[in-house]
Image (cartoon, rainbow, N blue to C red):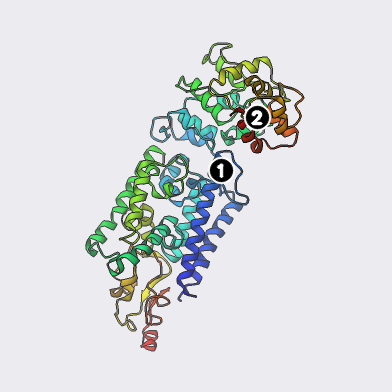
Amino acid sequence: MKKRWFRIGLQAFFFLLVALISVNHTLIETGHTGIPFLSAASLCAICPFGGVTTFIGFITYGTLAQQVRLSSTVMMGIIFLLSIVLGPVFCSYVCPLGSIQEWFGKVGKKLFKRRYNKLIPKKLDKILSYTRYVILIWVVVQTFRSMTLVFKPYDPFTTLFHIWTDEVAIGGLIILITTLLLSFVVERPWCKYACPYGGLLGLFNKISIFKIRRNVSSCISCGKCDDVCPMNIDIANKEVVTDIRCIRCMECVSEQACPVEKTLELKIGKYTKEVSNNET
Amino acid sequence: MKLKLYLVPVLILAIIFGGIGLANVFGWWQPYVKRTSNAYNSGGSRGEGNVPSDITDPYDIRGSFSFLDIERNFDVSVEILAEAFPIVDKDFDEVLAQDLESHYEEMHLPYEIGTGSIKYFVAIYNNLHFDGEEALPDTAIFVLERDGKIEQGSIIGLKTDGVYTGVVSDEEENVHLELDEGEFSISGDTTVKEALEYGINIEDLEAIIGKIDDQNSLIKVVAEDNGFSFGKVKDSLNELIN
């Protein structure tokens, strides 16, 4: 079995889980019988980003932003812990919005072949990725000031899982449709250029315990890692991938794209010379 | 030390669900509203920036809103709400608007008291525009009258001091006539008598909901007493109208 299926399986699992919880919430809210053995919590109650946006208000006033539940802050803590250990794997293995963009992208790859995800120049691509931090700061500050979820009306994630309700805001719908359409030409456009939570988790690439490391001695500089990277990171020229755009999808590692064994791995600590020599 | 790829999903699942489980043990996993009034009050007052004030229309009150959420957005304190819709077995800061429905359902009231009622109450209490009317319990009417929000006797509340048997008093019948001015349809608060007055044949009705002993009874109650789920027979009943 290809290692890729581990990730696809987990993505599908979390997508379904979130979708069913949201459907269950709607059923209960509208007075219908809910799905047995499944939480009927609102998305705001399980979304870790809700915890982030309300955190300053929480420590300042001791209260959460409207619609946010304590479980959101718990989820925030859990995802931070996960990111400290493995980096931003939440984006690549868990986030349903990331998953659906990736699934749309698979169609795009078939349509545009090698041109897919290469339309935006690398330099511009990197600059645009900082937009996420502008959005992050705006969301956190405005949420603190108003103690309401200011981002919710624009949030494509909320829109995606409320599409069957009357809670869908037109702004969120436009952003969701735009994101999905762009996914045909650009890999994960929302994650790359707009996701404030992705931006925040991206910082964990700098401090995570496990990091993607390249064994310079055994690397044949074939560039396959660069080719498969959905976030257009120049992996082939790095010893350790700490780029804030990395989502730790592991597409580049030796167990997948890299043709040389033990050359790109998720590991703790640098490659020693001894190991390097053994491999070459 | 390197990590095999198959261990990544295992670690993700372990950390996420293990974390949730642990939070549950410590009582931190609270996906539903549970806030204390002190937490709100300590932050300042409405309009100072920390209290959300984006909801101004009582229509936007949803079943998942707690009394505190309502207090936060409208000029009605949780104490007033608790007085108007007393749910004795719960702390008022834990009561959700949707809880009213199940609470009053046990009383077999002739009309449903739920989220709609609380919207209506909040609208009257704040002198806000509200299209239509919703049933209110007598406790809510008492509060509205006491606080000078409505004139004495202008709205009749549903008696909630005893357990209803499904029989509707004349007083409540009047309320219903006021409430239902639109097109006739059979719902949970329609009585047999109303259906007969509309022109439905009692034999046709009994063929669907079973034997009718009292024409003042709710159709829903008769159906359920005869072992029929009202939800399942509702469509057939409304076909009689057509």
Q: Residue at x 38, y 37 (%)?
A: A146
For mark 1, name the chain: A
Residue B11 percent coordinates (x, y): 51, 66
Q: Residue at x 42, y 59 (%)?
A: A99
Quadrant for the C terminus of chain A, please. Answer: bottom left
Name the side, left or right, on which A235 lies relative to A97: left
User: Mark 1 vs mark 2: same chain?
Assistant: no
| Identity, as a three-letter code, of the amino acid under mark 1 | Leu
Figure check: A110 above or below A130: below
Residue B151 percent coordinates (x, y): 54, 11
Query: Which of the pair A200/B203 is nearer the observer?
Result: B203
Residue A5 percent coordinates (x, y): 48, 69
Binning the other alpha carbons within 10 Å of mark 2 as few (below 14), some (14 to 19) or many (20 upward) gives some
Query: Which of the pair A207/B119 is nearer the observer?
Result: B119
Mark 1–mark 2 Cα distance, whole angstroms, equals: 20 Å
Name the side, left or right, on which B225 lies relative to A33: right
For label 2, the SS is: helix
Figure check: B175 above or below A138: above
Nearer to us: label 1 or label 2:
1
Residue position for label 1: A27
For label 1, the SS is: helix
| Identity, as a three-letter code, of the amino acid under mark 2 | Tyr
Discs 1, 2 touching: Cβ within 8 Å: no
Residue B201 percent coordinates (x, y): 68, 24
Q: Residue at x 46, y 49 (%)?
A: A161
Disc number for residue B104: 2
For mark 2, name the chain: B
Disc number for residue B52: none
Figure check: A75 above or below B223: below
One can see residue A78 in this view: yes
